[in-house]
Image: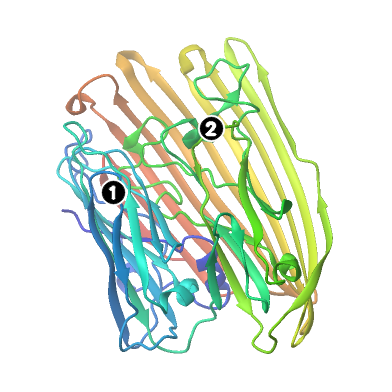
Amino acid sequence: MKRRIVMSMLAGATLLAGTLLGATPAQPAEARSAQARPADVPAEFGSDWHDPVTAAPPVTRPPGASCRVTLAEAQFRDFTPYTGTYTPPEGCGDRWSKVVLRMDGKVKGRQFDRLGYLHLGGVEIFRTSTPQPSPDGIEWSVEKDVTRYSDTLRARHDVEMLIGNVVDDTYTGIIDVKVTLTFYEGRAAQAPDRVLTLHDNTLTTPRNSERIVAEVYATGSGGGCEEYWYLTVPSNAPYSCQADNGPYREVQIKVDGRLAGIAAPFPTVWTGGWSNPFLWYVVPGPRAFDIKPIEYDLTPFAGLLNDGRAHRVDVAVVGVPEGQAGWSTPVNVLVWQDAGRAHVTGRLTAHTAGELADSSTYTPGPEHRVDTEGDHRLTVVGYVDTSHGRVTTTVRRSLANTSTHRWADGENPDALKATWTDDESVTVDGRGPARTTRTHRTYTMDGTTTIGAGDRLRTRLTLGDRAEVTVTRSGRPTGWYRLDDTYAGDATYTINVPRDQRHAVGTTSERYRIRGSAGCYDRSVGTAQGVLVREREGC
């Protein structure tokens, strides 16, 4: 086995929020000066390649004593979940400065990419997908900061984990994983007081809730067209994946039937995506192993939710053809309580939902073309009367998507250029100067697949995951950061032949950059024919 690389699950907003507050990613001396050792690059992919590697930063770990618990250990051959029981660690108390989840995996042979989840007491604390193995086998590791689930981790719970898999004469890869939790003593981190799940799509919050955030692990997957939702076209266009109105997707959450939050789903490309697994054998696309939840600030609805009754909470994906499966949208609800009051009252004072604009125009010709434009806006305002005074929360969110999809007869070539933006502003006014957090998210995809002479399939693809965040108090900046995670790949192989006759070649790269008021992180990796040829780190 080649040396293993830890995949950080903190590649997005959670890490960056920590960075903004001064928790910059650790950069050991050997990592800051690391360069890939010279390696012989073969003329084409062989029967083995480097274990999966990412440019994302590792999870930082605080100093001091720690305790470790094994959460799950299983071999996945089919769709039978692993079940077990979690018991909190002994000797580390019940208030932790950080809790880190780590999954170590290995697989060999032949296997598709698979999607997996880990539930603790019904709470989804981890969602991931898997790399595709070499015949000789690969190993990989993923880490995630799960401190926000401390409320769940303080009690004994059932554990359920599943990475659905198929093993037969063709697909031989058995996915072998071990998941541990490491608890770090020290000053307790600021984590939600409660972590709740829905029961038959209903939610009952504590009556003294003063902040409520829903998180939705939304993934389009399952092998059907919704796995490639960004490539779907209107039903009047001659393409293999059709949807009623085209590729616009939006993840909505509703409270008692009223729209409470909107978000753009991240266009994840799994490790078999774009018809070319050689793009992903070593460097996965952004978030492929880091399936971060969409967050919705539901605090404006706290006055309504705090009445002690069960309220209906629904999540829907706009644009999915009626009756068509393919999306998973599990929900956790994080709650912060007012220790000084048994019942926090309040009300929703403003709710403005703009009209959803979603149009996909098909233009026929020797080059078929679909142009898509979509946008949506939502503003909600509400207050809660807490033991420390009235606090008003204003949430504004606006989404936009533009894409151009071009293809010829036979879907050769097949090209997409798309951009998604998700802008959010949350203002909390009360108990001191008003604080506003503005987040501008941009996701990009630019790729082309062609099949040339000799059945040589080539895919060129660039993916971008970017975010800009600023925090102000009374209009004065107090912190900022920018994230830019960019992947680029170019791979070619022969289709319609046995695996050992594909004669595949390919180069891939990823650069992950964070810059902000608290510091910076900059790392890049590059591969050729499955060999790691470049590792650079340093701001």
**Tag of residue 534:** none
The secondary element bearing badge 1 is classed as loop
Q: Position of residue 43 (x, y in %)?
A: 21, 33
* Dot 1 crowding, Cα within 10 Å, few <14, some 14–19, many 20+: few
Kind of residue at disc 1: Thr
The secondary element bearing badge 2 is classed as loop
| Quarter of the view holding residue 419 | top right
Q: According to the image, label 1 marks what residue?
A: 80
- In the rendered view, does 347 fall on the left or right side of 426? right
- The residue at 40%/69% (across/down) is 59
- The residue at 26%/39% (across/down) is 166
Q: How many circles with numbers are drawn on the protein?
A: 2
* Residue 27 visible to an observer of this rendering: no
- In the rendered view, does 70 fall on the left or right side of 437? left
Q: Position of residue 46 (x, y in %)?
A: 18, 36
Q: Position of residue 252 (x, y in %)?
A: 65, 49
Whether residue 326 is situated above or below residue 341 in the rendered picture: above
| Quarter of the view holding residue 538 | bottom left
Residue furthest front as drawn: 309
* Residue 513 visible to an observer of this rendering: yes
Give the mark nearest the N terminus, 2 or 1.
1
Whether residue 172 is situated above or below residue 147 in the rendered picture: above
The image's colouring method is rainbow
Kind of residue at disc 2: Gln
Q: Nearer the viewer, residue 441 or 94?
A: 94
Q: Nearer the viewer, residue 97 or 511?
A: 97
- The residue at 24%/43% (across/down) is 133
The span from disc 2 to disc 1 (Cα, nearest Å) is 24 Å
| Quarter of the view holding residue 351 | bottom right
Q: According to the image, label 2 marks what residue?
A: 324
